[in-house]
Image (spheres, rainbow, N blue to C red):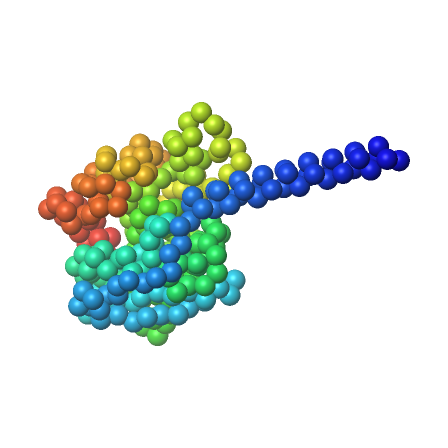
Amino acid sequence: MHLGWLELWKGSWIFVVLALAWAYIRYFEWSHFFVPRRAIVLTPADVGLEFEDVSFVAEDGCVLNGWWIPYPEARGTLIYCHGNASNLGDLTGVIADLRRLRVNLFAFDYRGYGKSRGLPTEKGLYRDARAAYEVVRARYADVDAPPVVVYGHSLGGAVAVQLASDKPVRGVMVEGTFSSSADMSRSIYSTIPVHWILHYRFDSLSKVGALRMPKLFGHTRQDETVPYALGRKLFEAAAEPKRFVELPGDHNTANWAMSRETWQALESFVMEVLG
């Protein structure tokens, strides 16, 4: 009897240790994909732009926050999906640049970021993007809605690809994004098969080939966060029509407006897609 209880006790501790190890792995993965920041440092008003602070709700009830930046007689609306360590307060410079494309802009924070409630997950981010799309469409419920394009930076590129898979958009633009989380893990942990136990997939590679709308890919060779090769891999998997543009700068400083050639590539893409 005594030995039976001893074996049961040992088995319980083994279970506890394994459960704690699994919980640590899950947290380690989560903390690498999501770096939510709450403080909003700047708003579009700080760069001289009028904007509307928008509260909206995802399909699972999570309350989210976004900014609507209108453009008079806009040729379309651009939905912006930011990266994993950003929030709306980091986007004022990007917003000012993209507004030159003569589009309305709707940028939003994922759940857990900025003033958006909840905690981020892969499925949650996809829900948030779909909710952002519905916010844009609802603004034109009684009139012909201008066409929508979606833009994603880094992790936001995976969100943009999923949104384009879920909703009718006229075009997709991704910058500094990766092919899949499995490919990212292989690039970071080349000798450890971490990708076998990943919960978050962000598998744009398996989705982008089915997208028939025009697509623009931007990536810098100096990207120290997302390998340039993974951006190229995603581009190669995409269906036509598509275009790849090499950007100046690094992962966080790359900007279409940094050179005349890259800005013209972005502007011409938007003009072709939106007219």
Please tell me in which quadrant of the rendered image residue 243 appears.
top left
Query: In the image, what residue occupies the spot 37% across and 49% down?
Result: 84
Q: Residue at x 17, y 68 (%)?
A: 48
- Identified at 31% across, 60% down, the residue is 88
Q: Is residue 181 left or right of residue 100?
A: right
Quadrant of residue 170 in the image? bottom left
Picture coordinates of residue 244, whole percent (x, y)? 24, 39
Name the quarter where the C terminus is drawn. bottom left
Across and down, in percent, residue 38 comes to: 38, 60
How many labels were placed on the picture?
0
Which residue is farthest bottom? 142
From the viewer's perspective, is residue 114 above or below residue 245? Answer: below
- Residue at the image point whose x is 33% and y is 45% from the top: 154
Residue 204 appears anywhere in the view: yes
Question: Image quadrant for the N terminus?
Answer: top right
Location of residue 190 (image quadrant)? top left
Q: Residue furthest right?
A: 1
State the residue lying farthest toward the left.
Answer: 260
Q: Where in the figure is residue 274, as x and y percent of width and height?
A: 23, 56
Q: Residue 94: image x %, image y %?
A: 23, 55
